[in-house]
Structures are given as structure tokens and as C-alpha cells.
Image (tube, rainbow, N blue to C red):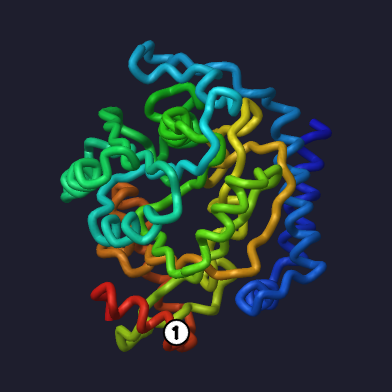
Amino acid sequence: MIFMRIDKIIDAITKKIFNPWLIRDILRGNISWKLRLFAIGIALKKKILLWKRWPFQWLHTIEWIKQYTISWKSFDPQSKKNGITALGRFKNSADFLEISMRSILPYIDEMIMLVDTSSTDTTLDICQRLALEFPTQCKLYTYDQAVYPWNHEKYVSNQDNSVYALSYFYNYCMSKASYKYVMKFDDDMLCVGEDFWKICNSIRNDGLQSFLDIPQINISRNGTGELSIANKYLSSWIAGIFWDHGIFPLSNKTYFFNDTGCENLIAPYWIQYSQTIWFLHLKNLKSGWWMKNYDGYGVEYIKKLNEWSTYISLPKKYKDILSKRGIE
């Protein structure tokens, strides 16, 4: 009970101090004391969650499907090579999957491509082609179980050790990593920071003992279809500042679970914010209002958010980067 109350107190404090000005600070490369306080609040909540849930031991699915069993050894950093694995969990990802993957492959040591076989587009074809082109770097796995998305009516009632749980899908992907540092990678993350190699080499050479958060500018289209940045809502400006995208060390205290509203990462680390924008987030440019993986749930709500938003112009340097990749 006391842990639940502390969780709620931390949530209330972080929501109170977080505002659009903090997002502007990130875009300017300024890490304010309020943002640091926000990060501390989130990290404390993660530690409380870990105390409540215990370290990861092993997961045998309640459906007793042996091929999806996850051993605790899969998260043991002592058994991993020094380097960075990107964790890709893909379903109906064809829109920007190839350009996103090609943008990050020069910087990482391994890409795990876990494809949900219920995809109805060319996601699997793209991954198969990249696995052939980069056989030592791109590792392809398939997942033939129906995964309930975060807004599905069965999401909350699902247990974390069910093959249908979104968190299990994520943990299964993470269990395939060959390297001790991992990065949650989405099919719409376009790497645009040419100096991203510096931070990756620093991690390989000096290690990483924190969660390195990776902010990404959310790219949208305004009412006339022009590439823009939506600036009405806290999360519309930027992604990746809520522990949802970053690089972190593997450990048996680091794993995903089904939380209210979305999957959540438990981790014993403090957060470290990057002061550089390395990625553009193309989620809002996807066909189908990016909701085609959610079985129709929430589509109208997303449309309304788009109608209510106001926009600012996208800086020319980012427009030029997107134009070179065929996105006008």
C-alpha cells in the first residue's frame, strides 16, 4: 500500500513540474534543474517498482509454449559481448522500416528484428532482405502469437508471463541480444545525428551505468500537409524523454512488464539525458494514423488530437534530411 501511495505522489510531482518549456530546453540543448528533478522522480518510481516486483528470474509462458521460454541467463551481462544491440519489435512496419534501420546500422553492433507474423504488409520481406544483406549484424526472429496492444480490452488482464502480453513480446526480443548494452529501437526512428557514433563508441570504451535517454523530435503534418512539429501537447513535441527510448545495460533487474496504459521498463539506473537530437520520430507520418497495429482502438481519438493541435515550422535542416529520403 505504501509503495502505491509513493508511486502516486511521484506521478503528481512529475506532472506538476513538467511543461512544454522543458521540451524547448531539450531542443536547445539545455538540461534545466526541473528536468533533472523530473528524471529523478521517474528513476525513483522505477526503483520502487523493482522493489515491488523483484529481479527477473525466468519466464515460462503460462501457455507452456516451450519455444518462447525466457531464461534469466538471457539478461546476464557477464554472458554478453561488449557492444550495443538494437531491439526491434516489428508489426506492419513497412512505411519507414528500411530507411530507419539503414540509418542506425552503421553505429550499432547488432539489430534484433522480431517480427510479429500477423503483419499484413511487407515487414517480414524487408527484414529478410536486410538479414541477407547484413548477415552478421541483422538477426531475424518471428513471433507467431497474437500480442494484445496497450489499448486492447484484454491488455490489462493479461499476465506478464503470457505469450499474448506486450511485455512478454518485448522481453523475448531483449533475450536475443548478444551484447551487454541494448537500445529499444522502433520502426519509425530515423537517425540523423552524424555524431551518434561518438556516444556509441564511448559506451563501448567506457561502459554505461545509467539509462541514456534519447530525445526525438516528433514529425507531423499540419493542416496543409506540410512537414511540421505539433506543439500543443506535452508529448507532441518530442518523444523519448519518459524512459521509452534509450540505451541501457542488461541485467536481471532490467525488464519490461505490463503497466497501466503501456508497457513499462523496470531498471535500477538513474537517468541521463542526451543534450543532442540524434533521431527524428516519424510515427505521426505513418499511414493509418499509426494506429493499424491497435485493432481499431483509439483511431478516432488520434484523429481528434491531430485536429486540435497547433503547429510550428520544421527547421530546414530536418526538412532537407527527410527530403533526401523521399519524405516531402
Percent position of residue 29, x then y: 66, 75
Q: Secondary structure at mark 1?
A: loop
Residue 280 in the image: x percent, y percent? 44, 68
**Image height check: is 163 above or below 211?**
above
Which quadrant would the N terminus be assigned to in this image?
A: top right
Viewer-side residue, 193 vs 306: 193
Question: Looking at the picture, how far across and down is residue 24, in whole percent?
Answer: 64, 78
Whether residue 119 appears in this view of the structure is no
Can residue 129 be seen in this snapshot?
yes
Q: Which residue is found at the position 36% from the left and 12% from the top?
A: 66
- Image position of 321 (left or right of 170): left
Occupied quadrant, residue 305: bottom left
In depth, the one of 194 and 8 nearer the eye is 194
Categorize mark 1 by other alpha carbons within 10 Å: few (<14), some (14-19), many (20+). some
Q: Is residue 57 above or below residue 310?
A: above
Q: Residue visible at 48% across and 78% down?
A: 230
Q: Is residue 230 left or right of residue 57?
A: left
Task: Please give left or right for residue 231 compared with residue 303 in the image.
Answer: right
Towards the viewer: 190 or 81: 81
Left or right of 164? Residue 21 is: right
Image coordinates of residue 282 in percent, x first then y, are 38, 66
Q: Residue visible at 47% across and 65% down?
A: 279
Q: Given the image, on which type of amino acid does mark 1 rest?
A: Leu
User: Mark 1 — residue?
Assistant: 314
| Residue at 55% over, 26% down | 75
Query: From the image, which quarter does the C terminus lie in?
Result: bottom left
Query: Relative to residue 84, is residue 213 depicted above or below?
Result: below
- How many labels, in total? 1
